[in-house]
């Protein structure tokens, strides 16, 4: 399967990302940009988006980009910095870029933005298996 088609296949099989309302904006080998809007059911007790929401969006972008090389890539370590509080109606865009990849590991940085404003910064490491994505 061509690498740039893998994220679309992944999204079609990912009920959680579908529930989030994730859409793929751009995808190329080693990079993927996704987006979603914050809904009322995603808010915490302080009426801000639960931190897991921006984390999940970033993690989705991370997973999609990491798999564009054609091999199953699974997360082994991630972290996020929440920079700004998010509110209902905010439209978020997360772009994952592979900074370094070798035979076994891939290192990604994901920027989550609200417009031009950086609202979260995510870092992730994947283990690259030998299993190919099939059609």
Image (cartoon, rainbow, N blue to C red):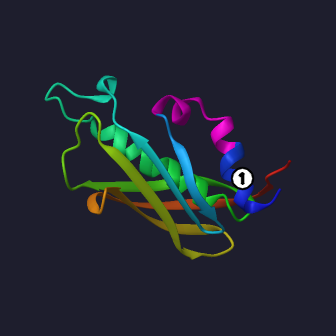
**Which residue shows up at 61% across the image and 68% down it?**
30
- Residue at 69 percent across and 73 percent down: it is 103
* Residue 23, placed above or below residue 133: above
Front residue of 77 and 15: 15
Q: How many marks?
A: 1
Q: Is residue 11 left or right of residue 84?
A: right
| Majority SS type along the magenta span | helix
Q: For mark 1, does the 10 Å Cα neighbourhood hold few (<14), some (14 to 19), or many (20 or more) residues?
A: many
Q: x and y percent of residue 126 in the render?
A: 56, 60
88 horizontally vs 45: left or right? right
In the rendered image, which residue does mark 1 sit on?
A: 6
Q: Residue 95: where, in percent of width, then height?
A: 46, 61
Is 21 situated left or right of 43 in this image?
A: right
At x 53%, y 36%, the residue is 17
Query: In terms of image quadrants, where is residue 101?
Result: bottom right
Q: Is residue 15 above or below residue 35?
A: above
Q: Determine if the magenta segment contains residue 19.
A: yes
Left or right: where 47 falls relative to 103:
left
Which residue is found at the position 74% from the left and 59% from the top? Answer: 71
- Mark 1 lies on a secondary structure that is helix
Out of 111 and 88, give the one closest to the viewer.
Answer: 88
Q: Farthest residue in the left direction?
A: 46
Residue 18 painted magenta: yes
Q: Quadrant of residue 94?
A: bottom left
**Residue 15, image x, y percentages:** 59, 29
Q: Magenta stretch: give its range.
A: 10-20
Q: Quadrant of the N terminus?
A: bottom right
Q: Could you tell me residue 2's position as x and y percent?
A: 80, 60
């Amino acid at each position: 399967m061509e690498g740039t088609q893998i994220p679309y296949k992944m999204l079609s099989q990912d009920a959680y990302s579908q529930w989030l309302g994730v859409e793929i904006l751009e995808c190329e080998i080693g990079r993927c940009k996704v987006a979603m809007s914050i809904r009322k059911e995603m808010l915490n007790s302080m009426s801000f988006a639960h931190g897991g929401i921006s984390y999940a969006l970033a993690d989705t972008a991370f997973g999609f980009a990491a798999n564009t090389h054609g091999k199953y890539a699974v997360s082994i370590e991630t972290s996020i910095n929440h920079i700004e509080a998010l509110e209902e109606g905010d439209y978020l865009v997360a772009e994952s870029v592979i900074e370094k990849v070798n035979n076994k590991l891939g290192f990604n940085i994901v920027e989550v933005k609200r417009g031009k404003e950086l609202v979260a910064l995510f870092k992730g490491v994947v283990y690259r298996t030998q299993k190919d994505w099939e059609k």
